[in-house]
Image (cartoon, grey):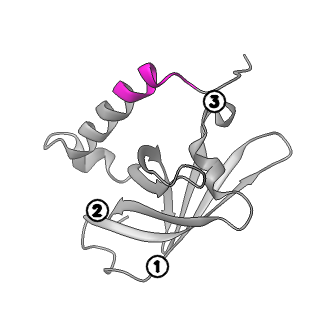
Amino acid sequence: MRYKGPLSKRVTGPVNRWVAGLRSSPRWGRLVSGRLTVVTYTGRRSGRTFSTPVAYRRAADLVTIRVAMPERKAWWRNFTGAGGPISLDLDGGARTGHAVARVDGKGRVTVAVRLDPGPPAGGGSGH
């Protein structure tokens, strides 16, 4: 099934709040924080600050986010071309970096984040 157009805020708002709450949960937080994070960025056109939960993989100072249903989401478009600054909730706090979004030949979107120097791994989730 091919999706078209952005998801409704009526749908995404409650889901995003639930995922963010799951990460901070005493029961489930440690389990999911190694796979889920919250990214915070400034919209290129609006200048407003946004936060959204995403699944990620990390290898040292490189974080990779595969965007599910990219045609229905707009946040990653802020990082096309030369990319831009981003903040991720990692290692028990905010980590800043530079994000660049790439679209492959099949329309799949990956956002690569090169983290700025920060606290040593192991200070938080260890991922």
Query: Amino acid under label 3?
Result: Arg
Magenta range: 7-14
Query: Amino acid under label 1?
Result: Asp
Asked if disc 1 and disc 2 are in contact, CB closer than 8 Å, the reply is: no
Tag nearer the camera, 2 or 3: 3
What residue is rendered at 28% in x and 62% in y? 125
Query: Amino acid under label 2?
Result: Ser
Question: Magenta segment: does it hold 68?
Answer: no
> In the rendered view of the protein, which quadrant contains the N terminus?
top right
Secondary-structure class at tag 3: helix
Q: Give the alpha-carbon distance from disc 2 to disc 3, as whole Å.
A: 30 Å
Q: Is residue 71 above or below residue 125?
A: above
Secondary-structure class at tag 1: loop
The quarter holding residue 69 reads top right
Secondary-structure class at tag 2: loop
Provide the residue designation for mark 3: 72
- Whether residue 125 is visible: yes
What residue is rendered at 25% in x and 66% in y? 124
Q: Residues within 10 Å of mark 1 (few under 14, many from 20)?
A: few
What residue is rendered at 36% in x and 54% in y? 34
